[in-house]
Image: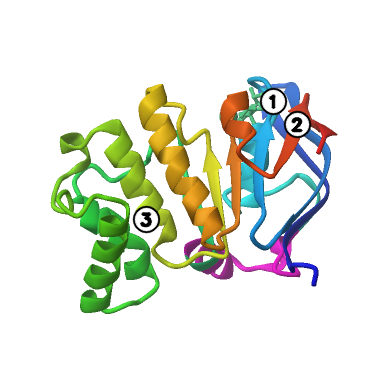
Amino acid sequence: MKKSVICRGIGIHKTYWRGKVEVRALQGIDIEIRQNEYISIMGSSGSGKSTLIHILGCLDTPTQGEYYLEDKRVSEYSDDELAQIRNRSIGFVFQEFNLLPRLSALENVALPLVYAGKNKTERIDRSRAILEKLGLGERIYHRPNELSGGECQRVAIARALVNNPRIIFADEPTGNLDSKTGQEIMAIFDKLVDEGNTLVMVTHDPNIAQRAWRIVRLKDGRIIDA
Ligand SMILES: Nc1ncnc2c1ncn2[C@@H]1O[C@H](COP(=O)(O)OP(=O)(O)O)[C@@H](O)[C@H]1O
Ligand SMILES: [Mg+2]
């Protein structure tokens, strides 16, 4: 049986304006992502990787073309609906972790559950369970500045997972880590795919990219190989 399509982009363009200079970051991207796929997006700096993954993750919108998530056109969602989709269906992991510095690991992970309206007991139980699964059971009350880079990224992964998203996006998740810690983070992502998750990851490291089942190569905002 063919696995269901989670996202589909058709003729996606993204143009930025830097003053009067037009920057064509994406120039006609067609892409389809199915359930339980493991995709890496590669390309040199400036090729449009972050722009693409932000659009796929509904953090940004195309200037031209259509993007469908779960068979619905993303441009038809209201802002509220979009915020809900981002919170419940999408997990996003960034290179810079993007944790809130004043919150503990547990509170950072629980934040999406606050927005999802879960009660406190459920928030704590679920957040703690995911942090324990990712090997951070002893660190749940630490703040980001009391954690190593690898630990911060594991907290960020836990936060991305806490609402059981349909799809996980990661933009150079090992880019700020030494290679040994990067390998540990990659082992977590590999395991998440083994468990049935869907993962799209941006990287410019070929060793990391080849762990995925499909590599999408970008050049100057176009897919040159998929
Ligand atoms: N907010 C922005 N404003 C103007 N130009 C941007 C913006 N974001 C990205 N760009 C430009 O778009 C192109 C693609 O950027 P990006 O998607 O970040 O590439 P990558 O992640 O592959 O390095 C680059 O030329 C970049 O300078
Ligand atoms: Mg980038």
Q: For marks 3 and 2, give the CA distance.
A: 28 Å
Q: Quadrant of ligand 2?
A: top right
Q: Position of residue 136 (x, y in %)?
A: 23, 50
Tell me which amino acid carries mark 3: Arg
Q: Is residue 213 above or below residue 177?
A: below
Task: For mark 1, give the secondary structure.
Answer: loop
For the residues labelled 1 and 2, the Cα–Cα distance comes to 6 Å
Q: Taking 93 as reference, is 14 left or right?
A: right
Residue 39 figure quarter? top right
Name which residue lies at 41% across and 39% down.
185
Which residue is identified by label 2? 217
Q: Is residue 57 left or right of residue 137?
A: right
Question: Looking at numbered disc 1 in the image, what kind of residue is underneath it?
Answer: Gly
Q: Residues within 10 Å of mark 1 (few under 14, many from 20)?
A: many
Mark before the other along the chain sequence, 3 or 2: 3
Instruction: Look at the numbered discs 3 and 2 and tell me whether their residues touch, using CB distance below 8 Å.
Output: no
Predominant secondary structure, magenta span: helix
Quarter of the image with the N terminus is bottom right
Q: Quadrant of residue 29?
A: top right
Residue 212, above or below 137: above
Give the Cα separation between the discs numbered 3 and 1: 27 Å
Instruction: Please name the residue that numbered disc 3 is placed on.
Output: 159
Amino acid type shown at disc 2: Arg
- Magenta part of the protein: which range? 68-87
Image coordinates of residue 133 in percent, x first then y, are 31, 58
Q: Is residue 42 above or below residue 71?
A: above
Decide which of tag 3 and tag 1 comes sooner along the chain.
Answer: 1
